[in-house]
Amino acid sequence: SCNEDSDDAYEEYVISNSTAITAFNLNADDSVLANLDSVHFTIDISKRIIYNADSLPRGTKITGLTINASFPTTAACKIVQEAGTVRPDSIYDYTTTDSIDFTGNVKLRITAADGTEVDYQVKVNVHQLESDSLYWNQMARRDLPNVSGTLNAQRTVQCGDKLYTLLNCSDGYILSTTDNPAAGDWQQIDAQFGMVPNVNTFAATNDALFILDENGALYTSADGSAWSSCGIIWHNIIGGYTDRVLGVGTDNGAYTLDEYPRLDGYTPTTLPDKFPVSGNSQLSVYANTWNKQPQMFTVGGIDKDGRFHGDCWGYDGKKWALLRTDVLPPMADVAVVKYVSYEGGSIISDATEHRTWFAMGGRTSKGDINDVVYISRHQGLYWNPGDDLLQLPDYIGNFYGAQTFCFSSTLTRSASLWTAMPSKQLPVWASIVKPVATRAAQITNEWDCPYLYLFGGINSNGTVNNSIWRGVINRLTFAPIL
């Protein structure tokens, strides 16, 4: 039986025009890459692009992958392949088992029930660089600033947010400064030393510069222009600690540990056995939740008897202590810098990030120059040779007596979205936020990237290197995921 309106009522049938792809992933294939099916893909409906913002590791084979895509049950899907390296141009029906060559142009062609047809470009991005390699770009190498004549000595220090480079050239002493080593815009300072400075003792605290003259007298300057005597004689400067400079003094022919300016009640103490009187590495700062004051350590050096050591000494703001012996081979003039390294994870973003100290260069008692980059993830207490990706390239050459610093630069992603700048995980100071939906992952256009800067050093011929090298862990230059 029918109701009274049955003669006039009817049900309208609407043919679907939906062409939306709602999910996409690669199928598992351990012969290609572990956890391949967990690689996240973004689906940009408006631009009709499907891509993995977190690129696959360099060398991943993408010539025979299978996919799993979700689209309306009323729609049909074809795979369109063009210009692949191993598969000829072809169009065929989508299945989850057909292999696809992603080295070419790949599209998913969705045809809705009403005949509407759209193409989605599918990009499987692979890094073109070894993501965990410490890369020193030869094109980024620069000369030391304002060199005049023959270069006899150099030393670079950091004071606040500025770098200061002091050179001893045949034409005199040249002091230059910059707050942006990437730009290379060094300003020469009209330094009025009023004495003969010992370039190798050049040091800095947070807000002042220090140096010894040829007779061991300590001098200081706020900006490098005017220098004044501190009224004390030292054998060597160890380095700067916050607002104080630490040094090796002398007292009736005996070495002492000293500082300037001295805290209330401070008196120089006897130099501990094996403590380096010269050739120690740059002081490196670290902090933890158990210490109110920053901690510092130095490695290597030459003791008062001329013996070379590979020990680690620490300073807590009040006193020195031998933290561990023989952490490195016995050597002097090692460049130490705090940076970052990664390990593990078959997918780039799954790698574990470590705060890492790098030790580069140095010389032994026999005159040999160290050619191994050592790393420590334990604040200088334990060191191991870095893997091959972290070693210095042959074109830099062996050296000792260089200085290394970490400064950030702002990078901008190329306008070519998916080829020129493949993406990767966030920089060292940020935490990655992994997307929870297939349309959530995107890459930022601008980010800060920390670079290492390696200044000078002395090569095996005894020549001072007139060079500034810039290095970076490659993954830090990849556009971070948001």
Image: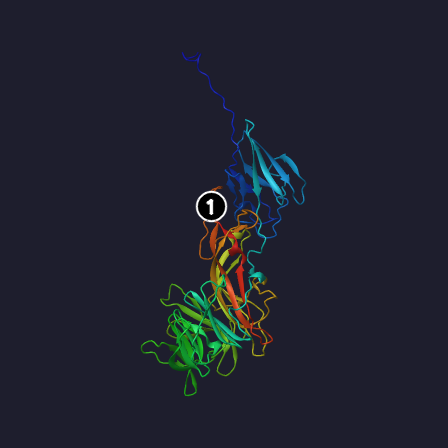
Q: In this view, does 63 lie above or below 173?
A: above
- SS category of the residue bearing label 1: loop
Between 117 and 468, which is closer to the camera in this rendering? 468
Q: Is residue 196 above or below residue 8?
A: below
Q: Residue at x 49, y 48 (%)?
A: 443
- The amino acid marked with disc number 1 is Pro
Report the coloring of the rendering: rainbow
Number of residues whose C-alpha sits closer than 10 Å to that of mark 1, classed few (under 14), some (14–19) or many (20 or more): some
Between 122 and 27, which is closer to the camera in this rendering? 122
Q: Can residue 402 be seen in this view?
A: yes
Q: Which residue is drawn at 47% across and 52% down?
A: 446
Percent from the top left, x then y, of residue 122? 57, 41
Q: Can residue 136 be seen in this view?
A: no
Percent from the top left, x then y, of residue 27? 58, 43
Q: Residue at x 45, y 84 (%)?
A: 215
Q: Which corner quadrant of the image does residue 463 belong to?
A: bottom right
Q: Residue furthest left?
A: 264
* Residue indicated by mark 1: 435
Q: Which corner quadrant of the image does residue 366 belong to?
A: bottom right
Left or right: 161 in relation to 74: left
Quarter of the image with the N terminus is: top left
Percent from the top left, x then y, of residue 40? 52, 45
Q: Which corner quadrant of the image does residue 321 belong to?
A: bottom left
Left or right: 257 in relation to 454: left
Between 167 and 101, which is closer to the camera in this rendering? 167
